[in-house]
Amino acid sequence: MSITDVLSAEDIAAALQECQDPDTFEPQKFFQTSGLSKMSASQVKDVFRFIDNDQSGFLDEEELKFFLQKFESGARELTESETKSLMAAADSDGDGKIGADEFQEMVHA
């Protein structure tokens, strides 16, 4: 699966353009611009599985650091503060990782 199977390349490029500078990544803005927030819960969970590098069923901070690169290989890494902010926004049970349901809830918040 390629991310462009479910999201348009133009929307992804626009979302990445908005956060190309360090410390400018805003999850909700990214989800809206990329089209993720318009997707069904099951489609968002498909994207989650694509982002989940080790297929553990969870995203940890190491995977989140490379979040943007899952949308385009040449994209920048998230900064430490962006990574921690993204984790805090989604980790509703406080276990230090994001499950598919937590990810879907964050995207549709």
Image (cartoon, rainbow, N blue to C red):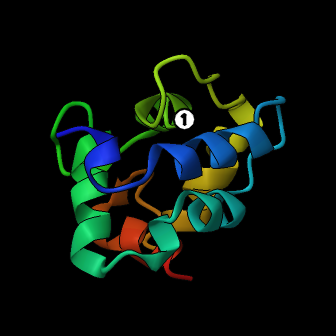
In the rendered structure, the answer to whether residue 9 lies left or right of residue 16 reads left
Q: Nearer the viewer, residue 6 or 65?
A: 6
Which image quarter holds the N terminus? top left
Q: Residue at x 51, y 65 (%)?
A: 35
Q: Residue at x 29, y 79 (%)?
A: 41
Which residue in the protein does label 1 denote? 68
- Which residue is at the far top? 74
Circle 1 — which element? helix
Q: Nearer the viewer, residue 84 or 106?
A: 106
In the rendered image of this protein, does residue 33 appear above or below residue 20?
Answer: below
Which image quarter holds the C terminus? bottom right
In the rendered image of this protein, does residue 14 appear above or below residue 54?
Answer: below
Q: Nearer the viewer, residue 107 or 57?
A: 107
Residue 27 placed where, x, y %? 65, 58
In the rendered structure, the answer to whether residue 89 lies left or right of residue 35 reads right
Residue 31 placed where, x, y %? 57, 63
**Numbered label tally:** 1
Q: Residue at x 41, y 33 (%)?
A: 70
Residue 93 placed where, x, y %? 43, 72
Residue type, label 1: Leu
Q: Residues within 10 Å of mark 1 (few under 14, many from 20)?
A: many
Residue 20 placed where, x, y %? 77, 32
Q: Residue at x 44, y 52 (%)?
A: 8
